Image (cartoon, rainbow, N blue to C red):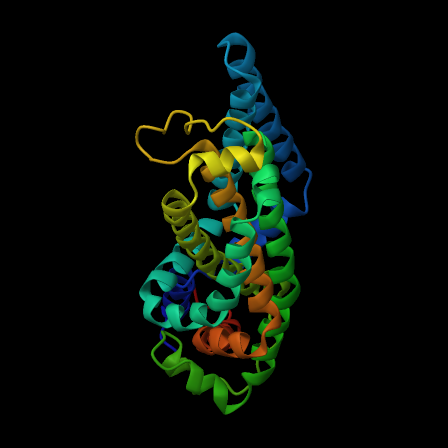
């Protein structure tokens, strides 16, 4: 029989691998929140505090409206992140995704190099296009960040459409002898040989947990790619595009980067175009990752083992005697 603390060890393993919803208590608590009116009240309170902070900065402290809008957005994102991280336990998934991404950088670069050549060709052409500068460089800062957010939302939608299919495919593969094989090296290894029943379908919150963990993992890769391309555009633009050309393209005088001009040697126009094209490149890369069969097979080859272990360990966990802690 499995030892008395097997369930406790498995629950700790779930938490360490970014799978808090695989533990019944956590999943029940989250489901209770999401299925009640408290979630609406919490979101209304977060929005009210964010709007209040923006109004306070814009009026009482006599700052510009764009600054107040930015402060309100930051307060909203901070409170929403705190809410999601503490109550919905998404911080656990994010920490796992960060550890895994930076622990496998050597595997990530070969994957990125499949998309980078065509990506660089496309966005470098856009970078030296006058119309792109006229649009991106002359945007107000709030509109720029809204555009970046829009690209991020579209990328997230593409991932959320595809990732559940990958999870279901892995779930179908972990049956029979594969359960014990996938549990090797986990707290469920010994108990897996004593579980004779076939794995049940994952609960909806456990399946959502796997999708979210994969989403965070892919999002961090896209973020690193976008930051790298921002640095490329900033350096390339500083070296090859003089201020006179920028002024001819935009029809406006070149300005220094507000507040950061002395720290970051970029013009405001170059900064905005680099941010805009980096965000667009992140969306391009996300769509490529979802649609290119070779990239997907290489990417999921790296994470499928962890998905299989999660499904197998869950099969053992739900099969343990009910009197175990």
Residue 132 location (% of width, % of height) = 59, 44
Residue 324 location (% of width, % of height) = 44, 68
Residue 282 location (% of width, % of height) = 53, 55
39 lies above or below 103: above
Which is more toward the observer, 218 or 210? 218
Q: In this view, does 298 lie to the left or right of 3?
A: right
Q: Is residue 262 visible?
A: yes
Which is more toward the observer, 125 or 102? 125
- Image quadrant holding the C terminus, namely bottom left
Which is more toward the observer, 226 or 171? 226
Which is more toward the observer, 258 or 300? 258
Q: Residue at x 51, y 22 (%)?
A: 67
Q: Residue at x 44, y 67 (%)?
A: 112
Image quarter for residue 305? bottom left
Image quarter for residue 203? bottom right
Q: Residue at x 57, y 84 (%)?
A: 173
Q: Is residue 149 visible?
A: no
Image quarter for residue 1? bottom left
Residue 248 location (% of width, % of height) = 54, 35
Q: How many marks?
A: 0
């Amino acid at each position: 029989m499995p030892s008395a603390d097997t369930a406790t060890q498995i629950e700790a393993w779930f938490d360490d691998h970014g799978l808090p919803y695989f533990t019944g208590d956590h999943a029940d608590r989250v489901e209770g929140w999401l299925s009640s009116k408290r979630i609406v009240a919490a979101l209304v309170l977060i929005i009210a505090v964010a709007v209040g902070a923006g109004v306070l900065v814009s009026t009482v402290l006599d700052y510009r409206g764009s600054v107040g809008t930015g402060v309100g957005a930051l307060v909203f994102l901070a409170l929403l992140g705190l809410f999601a991280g503490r109550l919905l336990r998404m911080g656990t998934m994010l920490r796992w995704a960060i550890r895994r991404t930076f622990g496998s950088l050597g595997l990530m670069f070969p994957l990125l190099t499949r998309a980078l050549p065509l990506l660089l060709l496309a966005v470098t052409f856009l970078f030296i296009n006058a119309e792109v500068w006229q649009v991106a460089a002359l945007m107000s800062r709030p509109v720029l960040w809204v555009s970046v957010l829009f690209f991020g939302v579209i990328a997230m939608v593409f991932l959320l459409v595809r990732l559940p299919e990958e999870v279901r495919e892995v779930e179908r593969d972990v049956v029979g002898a594969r359960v014990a094989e996938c549990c090797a090296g986990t707290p469920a290894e010994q108990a897996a040989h004593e579980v004779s029943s076939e794995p049940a379908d994952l609960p909806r919150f456990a399946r959502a947990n796997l999708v979210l963990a994969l989403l965070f993992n892919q999002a961090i890769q896209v973020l690193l790619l976008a930051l790298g391309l921002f640095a490329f555009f900033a350096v390339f633009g500083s070296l090859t595009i003089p201020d006179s050309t920028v002024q001819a393209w935009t029809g406006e005088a070149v300005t220094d980067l507000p507040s950061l001009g002395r720290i970051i040697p970029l013009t405001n126009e170059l900064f905005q175009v680099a941010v805009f094209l980096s965000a667009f490149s992140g969306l391009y890369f996300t769509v490529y990752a979802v649609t290119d069969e070779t990239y997907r097979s290489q990417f999921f080859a790296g994470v499928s083992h962890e998905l299989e272990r999660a499904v197998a360990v869950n099969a053992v966990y739900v099969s343990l005697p009910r009197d175990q802690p």
